[in-house]
Image (tube, helix red, strand yellow):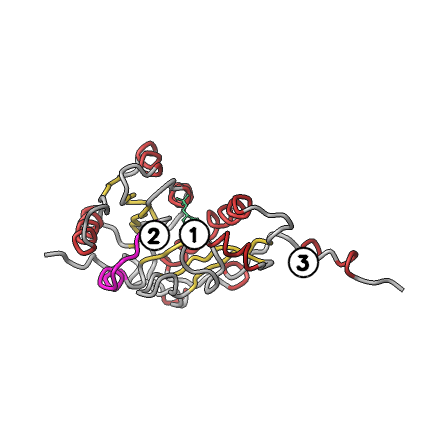
Amino acid sequence: MTRVPPAGRFGPARATRPAATRPAATRPARVAALISGRGSNMLALADAAARPGCPFTIALVLSNRAEAAGLALAAARGLRTACVESRGRDREGFEAAVQAELERAGAEYVALAGFLRVLTPGFVARWEGRMLNIHPSLLPSFPGLNTHARALAAGVKLHGCTAHLVTAGVDEGPILAQAAVPVLPGDSEAGLAGRVLAQEHAVFPAALAALVSGIALPPAEGALANPLPVAAALPMDRVTRSG
Ligand code: GRF
């Protein structure tokens, strides 16, 4: 029988709990990073965890694909790794095996760091309030896959990324942090993806740190980080008529 993992040392995670009522943290929260591929967001979390005072530690890196490059990168860093292959397995069996690995590692939070599997409502409910996802768009725009191509096709002028709590609806959970990047003239999908990815690497660790600490990111830090001033994004000298 699987058991529900213990609530974190910081009590049940509530992103909106006021800082004044937070119990003092005595050790970093144990986070499992779930990956499916190259693992750059997982490495951003690991980098953050290595900094003094970080409120979380990476207790496990778990991949659903043995060939995920991120798995080898995590092992090279000395992180605990596990692989639970999802191919050819039913969802319940796969998730029971993942849950067992999470419990073995003593995980208190789960970070979906490029994890390309939709989780069942039962698994999501088990980790309610303690599972964070990084998504490469400004949700609620462009949930799902191929976000950069869809943003370019839609002609949006701002694109970006979102760190949000995971709920049963795909890419629908409460938003903890977002960062925006401008879509530039002639942008390619790869170019836009690269600029968004750089923001993901900043937003995801910040949102995770806030989550495990039970604090809400102030809007100025957490809601929007547009790296270009408006004047640079909108060339007013070219659109304003003189005389
Ligand atoms: C990222 O863009 C993430 O937002 C999305 O999948 C991609 C994973 O990249 N969910 P990486 O494996 O973290 O490098």
Q: Is residue 208 left or right of residue 126?
A: right
Is residue 62 in view from this perspective?
no
Which residue is labeled 1 in the image? Answer: 204
Q: CA distance from mark 1 to mark 3?
A: 24 Å
Q: Say which quadrant the N terminus sits in.
A: bottom left
Marks 1 and 2 close (CB-CB < 8 Å): yes
Which residue is labeled 3 in the image? Answer: 230
Q: Amino acid at mark 2?
A: Ala
Q: Amino acid at mark 1?
A: Phe
Which residue is labeled 2 in the image? Answer: 111
Element at badge 2?
strand
Residue depicted at 41% across the width and 54% down the height: 145
Mark 3 residue crowding within 10 angstroms, few (<14) / some (14–19) / many (20+): few
Q: Nearer the viewer, mark 1 or mark 3?
A: 3
Q: Which quarter of the picture shows residue 76?
A: top left
- Residue 58 in the image: above or below residue 134: above
The count of marks equals: 3
Across and down, in percent, residue 180 comes to 55, 56
Q: Is mark 2 within 8 Å of ligand 1?
A: no
Q: CA distance from mark 3 to mark 2?
A: 33 Å
**Which residue is nearer to you in this view: 96 or 202?**
96
Furthest-top residue in view? 76
Marks 3 and 2 close (CB-CB < 8 Å): no
Across and down, in percent, residue 214 comes to 37, 62
Element at badge 1?
helix
